[in-house]
Amino acid sequence: MYWLTADEIAAKDPELAIISIGSIEQHSHHLPVMTDWALAMEFGRRVAEKMNAFALPALPISNCREHMGKKGSVWMEPLTFYHMMEDIVLSLKTQGFKKVGIVLCHGGVFILTPFIRDMNAKYNPDLMIAMAEPDASALLHQQGVLEDPNIEIHAGEAETSEMLAIAPETVHMDRAVDCTPDAKRSYLSYGSIFRLSPHGVWGKPSLASKEKGEIILETASDIIVDELNKAFAFIESKEKFGYSNF
Amino acid sequence: VYWMTADEITEKNPETAIIPVGSLEQHGPHLPVMTDWAIAMELGHRVGEKLDAFVLPALPISTCREHMGKKGSVWMEPLTFYHVMEDIIMSLKTQGFRKVGIVQAHGGIFIMTPLVRDLNAKYNPDLMVAVVDSSAATPTLLQEGILQTRGEIHAGESETARMLAIAPDSVHMERAVDYIPSEPRSYLNYGSIFRLSPDGVWGNPTAASQEQGERILSRTASLYADALCEAFTFMEKKEAFGYSCF
């Protein structure tokens, strides 16, 4: 909706804003560093359309120190990111937005959980914040669309398929390498992804296709809309408990 | 450790420090609000002994807005907590501690992941920070039959049994109520625990016993010590990758 004029937005008077969050970070040999940002733009647009919401431009930079090692990954401090999100969300609240939906397209932004919890605890019921990630893997694996039975963390079958659907000219399938590290994801707090996977991949990109990508984009968008709606309905149904609206 | 004189500590010259982290928060009708703090003290001592470490006094207050509603839960902002931990850990680094093990006795401190990741990314190899919480013990405790019930988040079998072992006078088993909400844990970002569980419990406290509590504490201390050692070993063996020591 950011392509509308202020008067056009005033006429629609949306109560929901969508903030989609990407990252600029290495995505193995075959995907561009803009991958998460490209996904954030795509999912943000689709979700906002389905929910008749005001979509902000996707935020390109967040937290990704777990990708340190090769040039081209860009991060800010988690605390800076918290402050930035707080400022943006409160600016939306000031102008009368009651609901903010965060569409998270980079898994490594762990500061969002304390952020969302705190904002709801402080500002419910005047402001409600919910978050969803574009993850349709469980469902699509069950339906036989996705083949890799392992949990994809980075640049695998699903993410590569999505990029083949969004920006195929940026994908180099001939360079794709599969790797599923035998490690816990929490070890990304103890060393960069290159310590666990020499190619900076965590999944099976060789299984990717454009057709799968289009199915994922549509299915994951629907899942996000559903999860955000459920969360807002839950928050809206609360009544005062003791001293607390949270 | 903190009951020793500075000269005695100098003589031991420990390279590992343990920071136990608790919380003051409601724990259902049957457990005191000090529960997480009491468990942090107990496990901090046990783990510190195994690693021959300098044990700090357990921090009593962290982040727990998910328990808002009844008087007696005390929190600070997640960003304040980040700064508290960063300052304490930097003071340890300045005096030559190379390893810091965080023993986290309250699950709701989601700012811990960005904190640990960022400190390691910035200060490895001079400083290594690792964290353990119940996720490092529960699967094994279930497998070995020490725990009977699954799905505990708060004031259930495990926590109640440990309190029966540590401070039986503070436990009121006749008031214990079992309850496991059907919502996902992430809904604690959308409303306090009282929205999901009327008694503020998420687990099966009636299954707990005192004898079991001692077995849980003893096994958990070993599992925590092992998990911290594994994480430190993983970090110690890293070499520079590109521009990065992370």
Image (spheres, coloured by chain):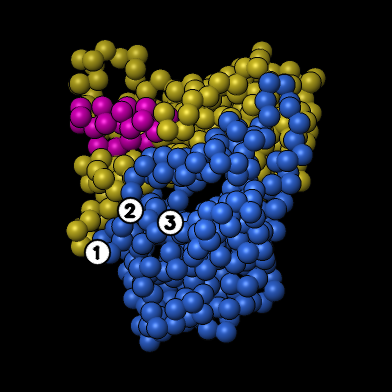
Chain colours: A yellow, B blue
Query: Circles 1 and 3: CB distance less than 8 Å?
Result: no
Q: Is residue A100 magenta?
A: yes
Query: Circles 1 and 2: CB distance less than 8 Å?
Result: no
Asked if residue B99 is positioned above or below residue B126 in the image, the reply reads below
Asked if residue A101 is positioned above or below residue B18 in the image, the reply reads above
Asked if residue B8 is positioned above or below residue B208 in the image, the reply reads above
Mark 1 residue type: Lys
Which quadrant would the C terminus of chain B be assigned to in this image? Answer: top right
Same chain letter for marks 2 and 3: yes
What residue lies at 40% left-to-right and 80% top-to-bottom? B171
Dot 3: chain letter: B
Same chain letter for marks 1 and 3: yes
On the image, the x and y values in percent for residue A70 come to 68, 20
Same chain letter for marks 1 and 2: yes
Q: Which residue is mark 1?
A: B71
Q: Secondary structure at mark 3?
A: loop
Query: Residue A188, can we see it?
Result: no
Magenta segment boundaries in residue numbering: A81-101
Mark 3 residue type: Leu
Q: Which residue is mark 2?
A: B75
Q: Which residue is mark 3?
A: B59
Asked if residue A194 is positioned above or below residue B227 in the image, the reply reads above
